[in-house]
Amino acid sequence: MNLNDEQKKLVAAWAAEGASLGDLQKRLKEEFAMSVTYMDVRFLVDDLRLQLQEQPKQSEAVDRLAAAKQEGESARSEPVSGGVKVTMDSITKPHSLASGKVTFSDGETAEWMLDQTGRLGLNPVTPGYRPSQADVMTFQQELQRVAQGF
C-alpha cells in the first residue's frame, strides 16, 4: 500500500483519536478510495509503528465472557420480555472466546460467537435471516446477562 507522507500523517492522527483497525480500513476507503483488507491495515499500523487505543467497552465484555468461561459454567437463560433466549456453550467453538445459541422472538435460531478480537458474529439457521432491531438489542442485553452469570 503506497501512501504519501500527508496520508500517513492522517492515518496516524486517526489512530491517535482512537480508531480501530476496522475504522482505519473504512476511512482509507472513504477518504482515499483505497479498498484494503483488514490484514493490510494491520500491516500498515505495524509499518507506521502506530499504537491503537484499546476499546474499553469491548474489553470489558471480553473480560466478563472470559471469566464466565474460566468458571466452566454453562449459563442458560429463560426468555425475557422480548422473547429472546440466549445460551452459552459449555464447550466453546474453536477460534472463539465464547459461543452459544440464540432463539429470537419469532422462533428463528442462530449460533453466536465472540472472537478473540471481541467481534460478535451470528450464524442464522435460516440463510439470509435478519432479526428485528428490537430482538438484536434484547439479544445483546441477554448475552451480557448470561455472561455475567445472572
Image: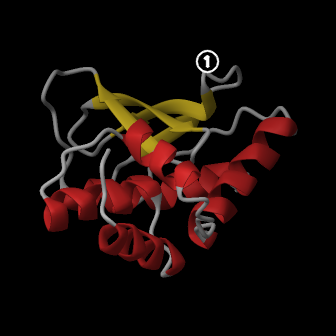
Q: Percent x, y for residue 103? A: 36, 36
Give the structural element (helix, strand or loop) at label 1. loop
Count of numbered badges drawn on the protein: 1
Is residue 61 placed above or below 114 in the rendered structure? below
- Residue found at x 49% / y 41%: 86
Q: Please give the residue where the numbered disc 1 appears in the rendered image.
A: 94
The residue type indicated by label 1 comes to: Pro
- Residue found at x 54% / y 50%: 47
Residue 11: quadrant of the picture: bottom left
* Outermost residue toward the front in this view: 5
Relative placement, left or right, of 111 versus 109 is right
Q: Percent x, y for residue 125? A: 27, 20
Q: Percent x, y for residue 73? A: 79, 35
- Residue found at x 69% / y 48%: 65
Instruction: Specify the quadrant that holds the N terminus.
Output: top left
Q: Percent x, y for residue 4? A: 30, 63
Between 73 and 19, the one lying in front of the other is 19
What colour-coding does the image apply? secondary structure
**How busy is the neighbourhood of tag 1: few (under 14 within 10 Å), some, or many (20 plus)?**
few
Residue 127: quadrant of the picture: top left
Relative placement, left or right, of 88 versus 27 is right
